[in-house]
Amino acid sequence: MTTAQSILEAAAGHMQARAATYDNPEGERSMGKAVQAFNAITGRDLSEAEGWLLLSVLKNVRLFQRPGYHADSAEDAVAYGALLAEAKAREVEQPAAVPYIGPDRRLSKEASQ
């Protein structure tokens, strides 16, 4: 039976497998570099968290694209959600470590004035 816990465990397993695949002990963490490249090419200012949000939206759209249950999309959406949360937390915990090309959107408008 598919349960919330089994989906979380599968998502965690995918993340661990990607650590081995990409030879990175922290797991798959290429979004920062991908967003930097995207921003350099397009002149945009997406954050790493926004990159993970985009992939999460993609997986959720795929999950509802056809009837039934698509485990890969569901599990990846959960994993991307965790990576999104990690990236958003890092914006506050380590603001200097978060590369931005455009305006600093980590702060509220009131705090930045």
Image (cartoon, grey):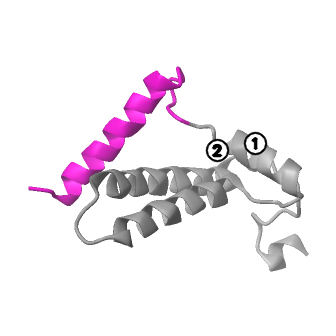
Helix, strand or loop at label 1? It is helix
Q: CA distance from mark 2 to mark 1?
A: 14 Å
- Looking at the image, residue 33 lies above or below residue 55: above
- Residue at x-position 57% and y-position 62%: 53
Q: Which part of the image, by quadrant, shows the C terminus?
A: bottom right
Q: Position of residue 67 (x, y in %)?
A: 26, 72
- Residue at x-position 49% and y-position 32%: 27
Q: Position of residue 91 (x, y in %)?
A: 68, 54
Q: Which residues are magenta?
A: 1-28
**113 and 39: which is toward the camera:** 39
Residue 55 lies in what quarter of the image? bottom right
- Residue at x-position 33% and y-position 58%: 74
Nearer mark to the viewer, of 2 and 1: 2
Q: Earlier in the sequence, mark 2 or mark 1?
A: 2
Residue type beneath disc 2: Met
Does residue 75 appear to the left or right of 21 in the view shown? Answer: left
Residue 2 lies in what quarter of the image? bottom left
Does residue 19 appear to the left or right of 74 in the view shown? Answer: right
Q: Which part of the image, by quadrant, shows the N terminus?
A: bottom left
Residue 23: in magenta span: yes
**24 and 64: which is toward the camera:** 64
Q: Position of residue 89 (x, y in %)?
A: 59, 54
Does residue 76 appear to the left or right of 37 in the view shown? Answer: left
Residue type beneath disc 1: Ala
The residue at which mark 1 appears reads as 97
Q: Residues within 10 Å of mark 1 (few under 14, many from 20)?
A: few
- Residue at x-position 82% and y-position 53%: 39
Q: Given the current orientation, which residue lies at the most extreme left position?
A: 1
The residue at which mark 2 appears reads as 31
Q: Given the current orientation, which residue lies at the most extreme bottom position?
A: 110
Residue 10: in magenta span: yes
